[in-house]
Image (cartoon, grey):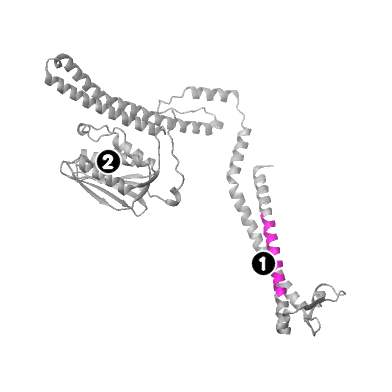
Amino acid sequence: MSENKRMHSIARRVSRSFLLRVVFTLVVTNLVLLMTALGWTAYTAEKAALGEAWQAELVRDIKADTNLRSWDFINSIEYTYGLKNGEAHSLDAGPILTMAIRAMNALLIAEAVLVFFQYRGFRRRTLYLLTPLRQISQTAEELSRVRFDETAFHSLEDAIENLSVQSPSARLSTGQSELSGLENAVNNLISRMHEAYKQQTRFVSDASHELRTPIAVIRGYADLLSRWGKDDRKVMDESVEAIKDEADNMQRLVEQLLYLARGDAGRTPFVPAKVNLSELVKEAYEEYQLINTNHSWKLRLDEGVYVYGDEAMLKQALRILADNAIKFSPQNSTITLRVFKDDKGFGCFWVQDNGEGIKQADLSHIFERFYRSDPARSRGGTGLGLSIAKWIVDRHQGHIDVFSAEGLGTRFTVNLPNYNPALHDQPAVVEKATTA
């Protein structure tokens, strides 16, 4: 049996089962309606003839002429009723039954038409739902008919052996038409592997470049110490202080690299919970007022803004943005922190400075690792802070909006999904770090 015939057969069986259930339901419903109508007719006639006495014990009987057939038999049916020791009453039930039967026949015809169209529609719907299975079955059937000869196997082996992930133009090509689907799948995989390889190569190159400078500085001051530091106290103090600063920079760079590496590998613990974003930003505002008196800090706060996330991670992202604002804005300028809820239901906070701003050409690159718009003015940064902030926000299924104008300043707005009690008030599940 072909796959099309098999799918149509399945659709017919499913539709037939559906049809039988519908017909059974309609028949039972119509019988109930018929019995209800007849019972109501008898009740109405009895009450009209007997008045309040219909509640007493009645004698009922149904008579018909058994010698008649078909409609004549139905028309001869007579319904009699009356009190046990009183006058008897009769009702010609035949015309009523005839009318009821004709009405039920008309109703059944209308329902039969409705069921027919429902059957057709349900069958088409079933065939539509079975389409993916039919396509899979057809593909499997085609694959089962494919016969690879020895040449096809050897050409496939040779093509795979000649592949190189390091080569941008690496592509699998066997010249066999029956292997075209496999070739496309492998070539797409190679393209993704090559892109990942380029990112890894660039990451290692950038990390090596960033470490080269502090290592060179430390080595230079170590040579200076070995030559003059023993006899010159001033040279010794200067060299030791510079070596400590560069060591701190290297430590900070290595910690940030490890954080990103663990994050990319899924080894950073993520502990989501209800977070009062208003309180979190308020605490950061009070801390920066104490530790950074060279700038004027301003807070614009909407109370009761809650988000669902890891509080420690969110605080780290906020500090990264605030430290950037301090670094790239002049002293005594104003840095503004704000918390609010936007029209889309996101809990938001922004960090805004009045600094030098970001060039439009650099805006699309600022979240790239080690990217600096002007390396000469990096001011001791590693170029990883914004990458970490973006990773944290992405981990919370949020996003960062950036608005900047040269000479006016920059505003980073972090948008986070709002806390939803119905969705998030469940037993907390800690996403533990995976082992390497």
Residue 413 visible? The answer is no
Q: Is residue 181 rendered magenta in the image?
A: no
Q: Which residue is mark 1?
A: 110
Q: Is residue 31 magenta?
A: yes
Disc number lying in front (2 or 1)? 2
Q: Residues within 10 Å of mark 1 (few under 14, many from 20)?
A: few
Q: From the image, which quarter does the C terminus lie in?
A: top left
Q: Residue at x 20, y 18 (%)?
A: 222
Residue in the picture at 28% in, 27% down? 251
Q: CA–CA distance between discs 2 and 1?
A: 71 Å
Left or right, residue 217 beside residue 51: left
Residue 147 appears in view: yes
Residue 309 placement: quadrant: top left
Is 68 on the left or on the right of 134, as rendered? right
Q: Position of residue 182 (x, y in %)?
A: 53, 32
Q: Amino acid at mark 2?
A: Leu
- Return the x and y of residue 189 as percentages of the image width and height: 46, 32
The boundaries of the magenta stretch are 18-39
Foreground of the two, 127 or 241: 241
Query: Mark 2 or mark 1, which has the lower sequence index?
Result: 1
Residue 237 horizontal side relative to residue 181, left or right: left
Q: Which residue is mark 2?
A: 321
Q: Is residue 430 above or below residue 157?
A: below
Q: Residue at x 22, y 21 (%)?
A: 218
